């Protein structure tokens, strides 16, 4: 749990953590747009390699990077399989299941690989941004970008109480294990249902307690955000340099004849 949610690496001192959060978000948005609009795998895979290499260069633990990529890799695998069997085209192989024949096609596999590469590319950008930018700076930057206040406030509260609910979920699960709640398949299903219900109930209770505590502290429907300073000259120079590089790389990788 600590590995998945900790901000400890974002508090290190390096070139990227010292950079203004607004600048990093602008560059990250440019990279994600390049990934989304790509029709080949070259741009997404290049972005993925660059981001992972940057994480390792900043001495992020390889195991931690892998753990955070496990979920997206599952999504990628699902996309590839679904696209391979749902798009018609040149058959690669067929399987029969319960009287149904499913055929994997070359076109579907290719389309699935492109979609999967987009997922990996976009997720790697967000992981790198999270590794070098504390969450509170991201929320502050979002307000500077004029994202609606209610959206930012809800996101901030969700982020804050994710840790509380995660701790409570862990406590309940450990208590169930001590009482042999997962000793068999049937007891495991019952315990998981109880755990889910408990988490929902506690989240509602926590929401009420949080609102009451905020009201007692003067909350009137709006969280105050301090104004941010001007972006430094060096950070502005970086943006001016980085965005054309991203655009040029996109057009070269997408349209350069091969």
Image (tube, rainbow, N blue to C red):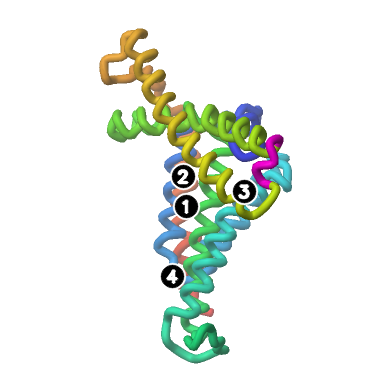
- Any mark on residue 31, and which? 1
State which quadrant residue 214 falls in.
top left
**Circle 2 Cα neighbour tier, 10 Å, few/some/many (<14 / 14–19 / ≥20):** some
Q: Which residues are magenta?
A: 178-182
Q: Nearer the viewer, mark 3 or mark 1?
A: 3
Give the alpha-carbon distance from disc 2 to disc 3, as whole Å: 49 Å
CB atoms of marks 2 and 1 within 8 Å:
yes
Which residue is under mark 3?
Answer: 187
Q: Secondary structure at mark 1?
A: helix
**Percent position of residue 182, x then y:** 66, 46
Q: Give the number of the mark in front: 2 or 4.
A: 4
Q: Residue at x 49, y 85 (%)?
A: 102
Q: CA distance from mark 2 to mark 1?
A: 6 Å
- Residue 257 location (% of width, % of height): 49, 78
| Residue 140 shows in the view | no
Q: Earlier in the sequence, mark 2 or mark 3?
A: 2
Which circle, 3 or 4, is nearer the viewer?
3
Mark closer to the chain start, 1 or 4: 1
Mark 3 or mark 1: whose residue is earlier in sequence: 1
| Residue denoted by label 2 | 27
In the rendered view, does 227 fall on the left or right side of 116?
Answer: left
The residue that disc 4 covers is: 39
Residue 65, position in %: x, y? 66, 47
The tag earlier along the polypeptide, 2 or 4, is 2
């Amino acid at each position: 749990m600590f590995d998945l949610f900790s901000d400890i690496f974002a508090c290190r001192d390096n070139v990227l953590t010292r950079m203004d959060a607004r600048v990093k978000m602008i560059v990250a948005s440019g990279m994600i747009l390049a990934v989304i609009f790509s029709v080949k795998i070259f741009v997404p895979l290049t972005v993925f390699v660059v981001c992972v290499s940057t994480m390792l260069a900043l001495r992020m633990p390889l195991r931690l990077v892998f753990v955070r990529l496990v979920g997206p890799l599952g999504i990628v695998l699902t996309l590839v399989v679904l696209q391979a069997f749902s798009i018609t085209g040149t058959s690669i192989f067929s399987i029969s299941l319960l009287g149904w024949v499913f055929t994997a096609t070359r076109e579907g596999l290719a389309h699935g690989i492109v979609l999967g590469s987009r997922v990996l590319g976009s997720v790697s950008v967000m992981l790198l941004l999270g590794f070098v930018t504390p969450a509170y700076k991201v929320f502050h930057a979002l307000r500077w970008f004029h994202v609606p206040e209610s959206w930012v406030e809800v996101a901030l509260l969700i982020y804050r109480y994710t840790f509380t609910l995660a701790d409570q979920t862990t406590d309940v699960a450990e208590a169930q294990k001590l009482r042999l709640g997962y000793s068999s398949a049937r007891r495991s299903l019952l315990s998981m249902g109880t755990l889910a219900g408990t988490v929902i109930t506690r989240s509602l209770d926590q929401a009420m307690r949080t609102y009451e505590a905020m009201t007692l502290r003067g909350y009137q429907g709006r969280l105050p955000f301090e104004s941010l300073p001007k972006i430094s000259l060096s950070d502005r120079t970086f943006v001016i340099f980085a965005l054309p590089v991203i655009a040029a790389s996109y057009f070269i990788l997408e349209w350069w004849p091969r």
